[in-house]
Amino acid sequence: MNEREAAWGLLTEFTQSESLRKHALAVEACMRAYARKLAAGSPEQENLWGVVGLLHDFDYEKWPSQEEHPYKGNEILKERGYSDEIRRAIMSHAEYSGVPRETPMEKTLFACDELAGFITACALVKPGKSLSEVEAKSVRKKMRDKAFARSVNREDIVTGAAELGVELEEHIGFCIEAMKGIAEKLGLDGSGAKTA
């Protein structure tokens, strides 16, 4: 079993929620795309970054409080033999963990986490429920609407792009494109609108 399959198995063991699983897939897609761009495109790096994206919230459904997430997950990852590099990156995505984001992978996870959720919310309110209808400009505009997807931390999105050294609209567009690559898995390929 390869690392990606093992990570998916771990995610599905702890996460029953379809929306949380889709969030993990969305963040994984963004992480893999950034790995190709920032980590010299090595397949090992792309896989590593992808696994981090897939697993960053695997413990959230069972332990959603700040006292437990991502700490419980970190313990489980350690027990299951995941590297310090993976565990540290996942710890660093929680602002309150006290683990500073230092590596490009850590900064990318933080930058993509909230944004992937927000892009998903933007796609779901489009007539076709499709990522092909979502543009970076419209995402920026929706960010100003505090009532829309209010659980998404806009400050984290802005800070994440700044830490990556990428202009916000460019970062949003990059993540939209990455997510389009797995739109069907995310249920954001327009098929949801046809059955509704």
Image: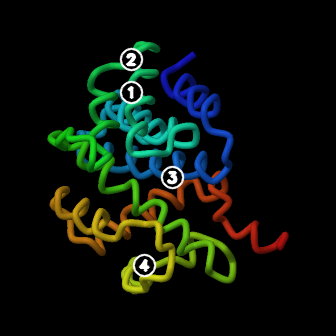
Residue linked to disc 3: 26
Residue 78 — which label?
A: 2
Please report whichever mark, 2 or 3, sits nearer to the chain's N-terminal start: 3
195 vs 149, left or right, is right
Residue 75, picture quadrant = top left
Q: Are marks 3 and 1 in contact (CB under 8 Å)?
A: no
Is label 3 in a helix, a strand or a loop? helix
The residue shown at (52%, 46%) is 24
Is label 2 in a helix, a strand or a loop? helix
Residue linked to disc 1: 74
Q: Are marks 1 and 2 in contact (CB under 8 Å)?
A: yes
Please report whichever mark, 4 or 1, sits nearer to the chain's N-terminal start: 1
Amino acid type at image mark 2 = Lys
Q: CA distance from mark 3 to mark 4?
A: 16 Å
In the rendered image, which quarter contains the C terminus? bottom right
Residue linked to disc 4: 139
Of the residues tagged 2 and 3, which is closer to the observer?
2
Amino acid type at image mark 4 = Val
86 vs 163, left or right, is right
The one of 13 and 126 positioned closer to us in this rendering? 13
Measuring from the top left, give residue 178's x and y in whole percent.
45, 57
Q: CA distance from mark 3 to mark 1?
A: 21 Å
